[in-house]
Amino acid sequence: MSIKAFAANPTRLIPTLRVTPSLRVIPAQAAVRRTGIHFQTWALTLALALGLSITIAPTQAATEVLDQVVAIVDDDVIMASELRERLGTVTETLQARGMEMPPEDELIRETLDRLILESIQLQMGQRVGVRISDAQLDQAVARIAAQNRMNVDQFIARLEQDGQSYAAMRENVRREMVLQRVQAGNVSQRIQITDQEIDNFLNTEEGQALTQPEYRIVHALLPLSPDAPADEKAAAEAHVDQLLQRIRAGEPFDEVIASSGGKYTFTGGDLGWRKKSDLPSLFAEAAPPLAEGETSDPIESASGIHLINMNAKRGGEQIVSQTKVRHILIKPSEILTDDAARQKAADLKQRIEGGEDFAELAKEYSEDIGSAREGGDLGWTQRGQMVPEFENAMESATIGEITNPVRSQFGWHILEVTERRQQDMTDQAIRNKAAEYLHGRKYQEELDAWLRKIRDEAFVDIK
């Protein structure tokens, strides 16, 4: 697909965003029937009004057509220019994929259906105050550029080279992000995953396969005939042992194997991510116990002598460092300046160090409503749950120490680490992965039902 098509259809590039599904199920023809116009007649008339044949890009139109309203959707309208632009994008995408073009009236209907449904969702987002910040938009654009193996500047230059507007592309991305948030906010609350469902799923072959740990192994084989003389075999084994000593002394596995050369040349390479059941039987027992970066003892087979290096692991046993912490938050305001808020937090630190009770001061002064009633207690936390500034202070603090005021996006904190522990989160991680999978499986079904519902409830007048 060209950069032009990418820019006009960004949902294909943002993995966090869900593309709106096919809308063939949405009864748009019913709305047309209310106008008393036969749909095919209306579609062909509209095609003429749009000034294009569906197989020709909009810029090739022979005549300039005045814009007009093609549909009223609640408090919004869809213009002929919007439909014309989207039809051009859809056509270009289908052609780029080598797909057969649907009948003209069907293409117009489905494209207009999609615009109508998007309009309904965008209006819902506007009513509830969904906003995409410039920073969030920048991150999304960076992901799109990375997926095209470019940095942002290169991506912008490519867009301009193809005659596309970077500003228009950003607005398309913003639109799709709003749609994704509206969908997630309305659909996720309709999905309930029970503990019994998770248990049942984990007892199936599919569930057990999904939650198996995965290993990324790099394999090196020194070919050696099983009929090789004893002295040749001993020399090969001694060479492998020398290489293994270098690896275990800290030299990178790949570099050591590549340096072998000469008489002893290794074959093999990266086996990629594999579950235990997908590992070669020769490695199935030796690989899983290896820690990340660890190399196995030599493994002999009829093919020769093998070394395997555990490049990375995911899933499996998960031991997590957790910290129990409490804090007091002071927020700057129109009345309390930032400096004054910091000083207030510093004063509270001195009072605690002078013997006053942390929990009582948190209940009286902390502006974190959720934790203040618990004496500032945030319970057990682990990396990734708190904002970076808070986490950095938490990790560097000793148990029982009251930190100096720490500034975060929420205000000024003073905090105290009360305990640390190593917690086995393996079972919880497995259940979380199963719940996420079941949620995703239900999501599309619920999304389709929700889209039909909001379409049926909306006022739509196709002109």
Image (spheres, rainbow, N blue to C red):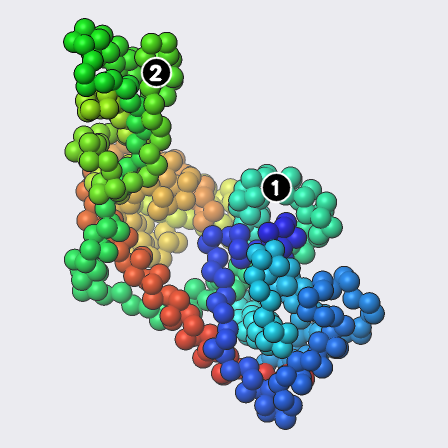
Which of the 4 image quadrants contains residue 213? top left
Q: Amino acid at mark 1?
A: Val
Q: Residue 125, how many percent across, how many down?
A: 53, 68
Identify the element where label 2 is drawn: loop
Residue 250: x and y in percent read 31, 16
Residue 41's quadrant in the figure? bottom right
Q: Say few, some or many: other residues with alpha carbon within 10 Å of mark 1 (under 14 / 14 to 19 / 20 or more).
A: some
Q: Say above or below: 453 vs 20.
A: below
Residues tagged 2 and 1 counted as in contact (Cβ below 8 A): no
Question: Which of the two residues, 324 or 383, is positioned nearer the viewer here?
Answer: 383
Helix, strand, or loop for circle 1?
helix
Identify which residue is drawn at 67% across, 84% down: 42
Q: Which residue corresponds to the image point at 55% horizontal and 47% vertical from the top-left?
A: 144
Up-down relation of residue 73 to residue 156 (above or below)? below
* Distance from Cα at disc 2 to Cα at disc 1: 42 Å
Instruction: Please say whether residue 319 is visible from this viewpoint.
Output: yes
Q: Nearer the viewer, residue 279 or 253?
A: 279
Tell me the tag on residue 152.
1
The residue drawn where x is 63% and y is 93% is: 36
Q: Which mark is residue 265?
A: 2
